[in-house]
Image (cartoon, helix red, strand yellow):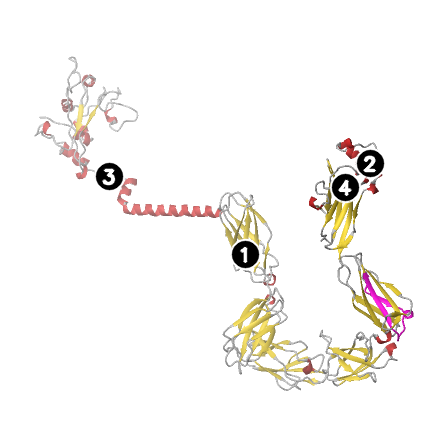
Amino acid sequence: MGLITKDMHNDKGMLQLMLFLFATAGVQSCHINVTSSVILIGSPLSASCDCPLFRNRKFDVIWKLDDDFVSCNQYSNVEACAGSMYFPSFNKTSGLLQCYISISDGLQLIDQISIKAGYPPTPPTNLSCLMSITKNLVNCTWQLQKDPLLAENVTLSAVRSENNCRTPTSNEYICNALKGENFCTISRQYFYNTRELAVRVTVQNRIGSATSSLCLIPFQEVKLEPIVIKDAKAHKDCVTIQWTFGKADFLTGMRCELRYKIPTEMKWTRPVEISTDVKTMDQCGLLAGTKYDLQIRCVRKNLTGQWSEWGPTTSVTTMESVPTGKLETWWRILEFTHDSLLKVQLMWKQLEKNRANAEHLWYIVKSSSDVNETDNILCNTTILNCTILLPTEKKNVFIWAYNNAGPSPETEITFTARNGTPVSKMQVSSNGDSSLQVMWDPQWLAKGYLLEWYKNAELPNCEIYWKTEQEESRSSILQDIHPYKRYSVRIYPLYTNYIGMARETEVYSKEGAPDHSPEIKLTVNKSQAEVRWEPIPVQKRNGFITNYTVFWIDPSGREESSTVNGSTTKCIITNLLPLTTYQLFLMSSTSGGSVNGTVRTFQTGVIDAEYTNMMILIFILIGFLIMIFMIIICIMKCERMKSRFWPVVPDPANSQIQKWTSFLEKTPEMTFNISDVSQIITSELNIVEGWQGKNPPLENQVNVNSLEYYGHASSKQTSPEVANKWRHYINVDTVQYAKVITEGYRQQSPPTSVYVRSDSTQPLLCDVSPSPQKYENTWFHFSNHEDNVFLMEEEHMKDFPLLNALQLHED
């Protein structure tokens, strides 16, 4: 260690070496010093970290209490943050105090110590010592404070003494109570029955101690053993009881008490003081035919001892007697059978114990009032209801309660009509988790009210609960109601000779979340989804369904929801993206809570089937409208449509061509000049020669007038010479123009005159082609040459009336 010099203390390697040497050689030499490891809460605490290895060397000390660093201003030397620290008030019940030194790699733990804080113990309470006569022991008990912060030791000391326990007369008896125990037993050798005994109980912990003391004479502080009933016999309404004190029979001056109860009841009757002179007694005033549990306890008379524990239970049943009083009854019609019989359910209340006079009863229903008849029995049962069949004209039946002693007085049940006036208002509300409060407005002339309730979820075979209230009653409490169950509550006003109509409502005493949310069914389209579900069964709703909420989540995590009424079983989600996967679940809610259903995953499609169907329907409607529109047009434009699709073709047999031919055979006379031609003329052809801008015909060309040529076309045959002349004529360079003037068709305005210019060097109608044009006629084709033109004779022209009409005849 002496090799370590001051210049080493800043060197990281040397510091680690020192720590290693410290850890291997001087582990026990470094520790934390505190004033005490167990202190009073709120008291000051000082501590120092002592390390001989680092004396006379500067280093930083860091303190931690549990997981928190201690502030540097709590150190004794604030500037240097030295190795001692001070808490002015330690307010924690426990803590781990740790001392570190700071090195370049972090903190190095030097030592740690556990600090506990608490309070001094409190004196024991309820210290008592009782002598057991049978065991000849003194048992002492006490009570300590609960959950002490510090561990405690309990010691009992007992010593025989005198002068009010101020002067001990023998050695002290010590009893160390085990942990968790609060009693000690003093054996007989350490006390006298008739002399004083000083008892002291001390509780001690690390902070301090507390003591409680008691001075007693053992024989005066006696607790008897439980008293045993030897025998119990019943006669009429009384019970004769005998008991024994066991090993304490030699004692005199005892006080004893008797208590009893019916086994089905929880509470015992008030204890009755009994005489102990003869150790036997008669207890009368009990209910006939009823089972009772009996117990006895005793204490020494005029002494400071304690009551003994209640003795073992003894059971006895009193003798039965005839039931008294009439039964309280109610009825309801279930249905009419096919044979006109009435199915009726009868109900009655159990007789009170003081009227039943027996532990068990059975009930007989008859159609006549003679209890001794055996032929008219409709029902014989031990339960409180019965279903019978009666003719529709039957108006009453009779019922009796039986026991071994005989029948009760008869009770008549009359089936009166239930058409009276109902109560004007009824309100049912919760009166806690297991009861309901019913309130109603009084009904004039009503002699009482009957309330009927049952669990709605158990229909139709539900158990009916009912009770009656007096005429002046305005409210009633219905007991034994199950929370989270729906009840139907009815109230009937009872009149003198008939029953009022019922007023009914449904209610829960307490509502909660449904047991589960219903399973959903999905119908998915391109942009929407229809969610359907079945209603939750009534027995699993646990309340009135206020609403359903549908949640759906898109792939990005965005959540949306839609809420519908609790009576609705479907929801339509819109504005969904096509080809997108969604997560969906249904939440069912009541006023008592909500529950989520199973998460479903679905994907929207490309084409919305509903949208497609709608578009198909639209196209069908549009087509239908177009068809109707076309039909209307066809009807309105019938003639025009007919001429468009079915044009009128002239019948050649009925044409006017023949008339035109006979008329045109006559040679018309020119009585006017060509210059006076008007548009009244049906047709006119003008031959214009030598049009300006054209070259005159050559000298060697033959000038043949077309009109003259038509005039010489009367011969049967055309000679080659003439034909050659015609061909020579049409090949000249002279251009001729034709002007056709026509009259308006059917009073329409005639078109303007149109000049048609032809640059063709071939004569008109001379093109002989396999398919003639509109202006050609195959009859004009020459048999030997394609460019020849037939010159028709007049006898053939009548077969072409239109061409014949174009002929001009001159004088």
In the displayed structure image, the side of residue 99 where residue 585 appears, left or right: left
For discs 3 and 2, the disc positioned in front in the rendered view: 2
Could you tell me the amino acid type at mark 3? Asp
Say whether disc 1 or disc 4 marks the residue closer to the N-terminus: 4
Q: Is residue 62 visible?
A: yes
Say whether disc 2 or disc 4 marks the residue closer to the N-terminus: 2
Residue indicated by mark 2 = 21
Residue indicated by mark 4 = 109
Residue at 78%, 51% (x, y): give it: 37
What's the CA distance linking mark 1 and mark 3? 83 Å
In which image quadrant can residue 375 be found?
Answer: bottom right
State yes or no: residue 191 in magenta. Answer: yes
Could you tell me the amino acid type at mark 2? Leu
Could you tell me the amino acid type at mark 4? Leu
What's the CA distance linking mark 1 and mark 4? 61 Å
Say whether disc 4 or disc 3 marks the residue closer to the N-terminus: 4
Counting other residues with Cα less than 10 Å from the Cα at mark 2, is it few (<14), some (14-19), or many (20 or more)?
some
From the viewer's perspective, is residue 199 above or below residue 548?
below
Q: Which residues are magenta?
A: 181-203
Q: Nearer the viewer, residue 234 or 111?
A: 111
Residue at disc 4, secondary structure: strand
Residue indicated by mark 1 = 548
In the displayed structure image, the side of residue 455 where residue 131 appears, left or right: right
Residue at disc 1, secondary structure: strand
Counting other residues with Cα less than 10 Å from the Cα at mark 1, is it few (<14), some (14-19), or many (20 or more)?
many
What's the CA distance linking mark 3 and mark 2? 141 Å
